[in-house]
Image (cartoon, grey):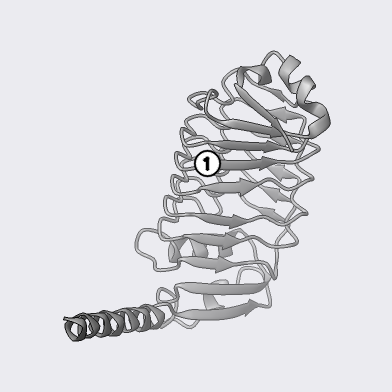
Amino acid sequence: MSERIENKFTALLVLLILGVSLHARTMVSDSVHVAKAGNLSTSIPKDKTFHDSVLIVTGDLDESDFRYLRAMAGSSGKLTSLDLSGANVLKIVDYALSGCTSLTSVILPNSATAIQYNAFSLCTRLTSVTIGSTVSIIGPNAFSGCVALTSMTIPNKVTILSAGTFSGCTSLSKITLPSGLTTIQSGAFAGCKALKEIHCKSKTPPEFADNAFIYVNKSTCKLFVPNGSIASYKKSVKWSSFSNIVGE
């Protein structure tokens, strides 16, 4: 009996190794440097354009380059992981990577200061986004409809969370809000039904629109605030609607 179990275990182990090996072969990684903005399409060899699943991009990028990336990660593309940390980009433009349904992870440029309107909306498989500390503006609907996104940390320089920023992010369970945040606009977290933890670093309760957290279950979602600010949040007409306000 023990020999039979051992044989089964060995067979399963072989299948697991083969599976990992096959996955490794299908995950094609490449890096490209764009010397002049607008030249991304000519910087990637044609035979690799829609075959890379992991892409690292450095150099200067403009709006046309983002359109090309959008095609690579769209419904017919295979780009799943995009690392732009070394790219020179001041703003992630409107609709920059919107609708990139193959994209699962993105690292944004360390140079970026703004994520604009609908930049990542409807990226339905996106689970991980790394935002640099230089970002101070996140535009309306920036991550709207990112139904696979589970957590997010907003950079310290952001003072206003725009309308609809995370609307329809139905898997979002944890959000960390920065200490300088003053305002949360209309529908910023509308429909975030999975939200279980809000870590608000601001000592003064930020103002928020009446429907900013519509369809968030405020009786089960824990609100974590600075230890010395618990009383302030509990006295706030709007924040007091959260049943569980905890210091940290």
**Quarter of the image with the C terminus in it:** top right
Residue 60 vertical placement versus 156 (above, below)? below
Quarter holding the N terminus?
bottom left
Query: Is any atom of residue 184 visible in this view?
Result: yes
Percent from the top left, x then y, of residue 58? 66, 74
Residue 184 in the image: above or below residue 143: above
Q: Nearer the viewer, residue 162 or 181?
A: 181
Secondary structure state at the residue bearing disc 1: loop
Residue 62 image-quadrant placement: bottom right
Give left or right: position of 204 versus 166. Answer: right
Residue at the location (34% across, 63% down)? 76
Under mark 1, the amino acid is Ser
Measured as percent of width and height from the top left, residue 64 is found at 57, 62
Bin the neighbour count of mark 1 within 10 Å (Cα to Cα): few under 14, some 14-19, many 20 and up. Answer: some
Is residue 144 found left or right of 107 in the rendered image?
A: left
Q: Residue 91: image x %, image y %? A: 69, 53
Q: Residue at x 60, y 21 (%)?
A: 243
Residue at 78%, 46% (x, y): give it.
156
**Which residue is identified by label 1?**
173
